[in-house]
Image (tube, rainbow, N blue to C red):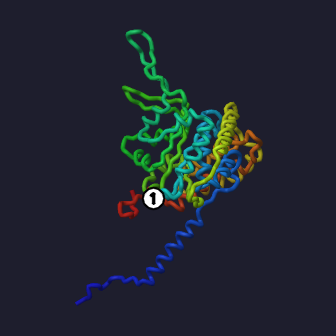
Amino acid sequence: MPSPNCGATFVTMAERKRTAEEIVANLKRARQERPTMGDDAYHGLAGEVVHTIEPHTEADPVAILLQFLTLAGNVMGRTAYYQVESDRHHTNLFAVLVGDSAKSRKGTSWGRARAIGKVSDTTWADDRVKGGLSSGEGLINEVRDERKEWNKKEGCEEVVDAGVKDKRLMVVEPEFASALAVAERHGNTLSALMRRAWDGDKLTNITKNTPLCATSAHISTVGHITTDELRARITRTDAANGFANRFMFALVKRSRLLPFGGNLDDCEIERLGEQLREAVTFAAPVGRVTMTADAKAEWEAVYPHLVGAAAGAAGRRDGARRGADRPPGADLRLARSVGAHRGAAPAGRAGLLGVLRVLRRVHLRQHVGRPGRRRDHAGAASSR
């Protein structure tokens, strides 16, 4: 009679220990191989903000940098722009911080950046920072135009909705996975309108009773998500239709341990806020921003490699193109918007911040995995 354990695989304690040691070693190796942001990215006022805050926070310097650039670009409004062919790229950024919940200090880094923004523009901080993405119509409503209707009795048009005068909108989503889940629902227009908002196009919804319209809207987005949530929620459709490609995804982690928090003086926040206000004032009449000759030479040299790296990671040429056509806009935010008014920006290296951005996206694909993979409640991966 065969043994009931026939065919079973026995794992000795030594083998279990060896397996555990391999897992720990792999985790350590993964941490060591995390992508890093080049020092040249910390230029101008943005760099000064990071270097001032960094010793007093557990937040990742990259998280501070990207959120400050996104914030500064939104405070600027629809003023300066960089032109690619016939498209004007203004200073609105979409950024997502990817890291462990409660350990990567994503929310802490936003709080630091917002404090500086509040000093720079109190009205913006109080009225134009919103959250809770749920529908495309809700997004349009926050930046909607004035609406008039014909009054038959009076024989003239009358204003039935004054609209929103300030077209700046800073969307902050601490639970970005929820926004992704909402965008997946059948008939929800959030994904499509977010793509148009990034492009700076006119936002509309075609309905018979209460049509909404928003022109010259200036929408920026900061989202926070964990790696597991990103794996579960980003689909192949998001990658293919350009929704995911419009976001800068950055892996972040806790930079240090501060049991009693930092000790950043309020006067430093005031000083940085005042400098941001000066930079925004400087950028207002600038209009079109162009590259210097040196910057053009460096960009021309790196462009083929940038497109190739992005295509290799995403496996799609459209994704590569999306990453490659926008980096000069990142240079606009870094150099022109938040610091170059105090002196000429380094021609090439600061101008390649966009390259660093896309290469970080390449590394993120390697660490997080491919889009379109979902996990069931047991944690097993399955194709959608």
In the image, is residue 315 above or below residue 291? below
Judged from this view, the residue extending furthest toward the bottom is 1
Is residue 159 or residue 319 the one in the foreground? 159
Q: Position of residue 196 (x, y in %)?
A: 51, 38
Q: Quadrant of residue 325?
A: top right
Judged from this view, the residue extending furthest toward the top is 154
Q: Quadrant of residue 3?
A: bottom left
Q: Position of residue 48 (x, y in %)?
A: 69, 48
Is residue 294 found left or right of 55 in the rendered image? right
Is residue 244 or residue 129 the one in the foreground? 129
In the image, is residue 199 above or below residue 12? above
**Quadrant location of the N terminus in the rendered image:** bottom left
Q: Position of residue 5 (x, y in %)?
A: 29, 85
For the residue carrying disc 1, how many other residues have a C-alpha within 10 Å: few (<14), some (14-19), or many (20+)? some
Is residue 62 or residue 257 the one in the foreground? 257
Q: Position of residue 217 (x, y in %)?
A: 54, 33
Q: Which residue is mark 1?
A: 228
Q: Quadrant of residue 90?
A: top right
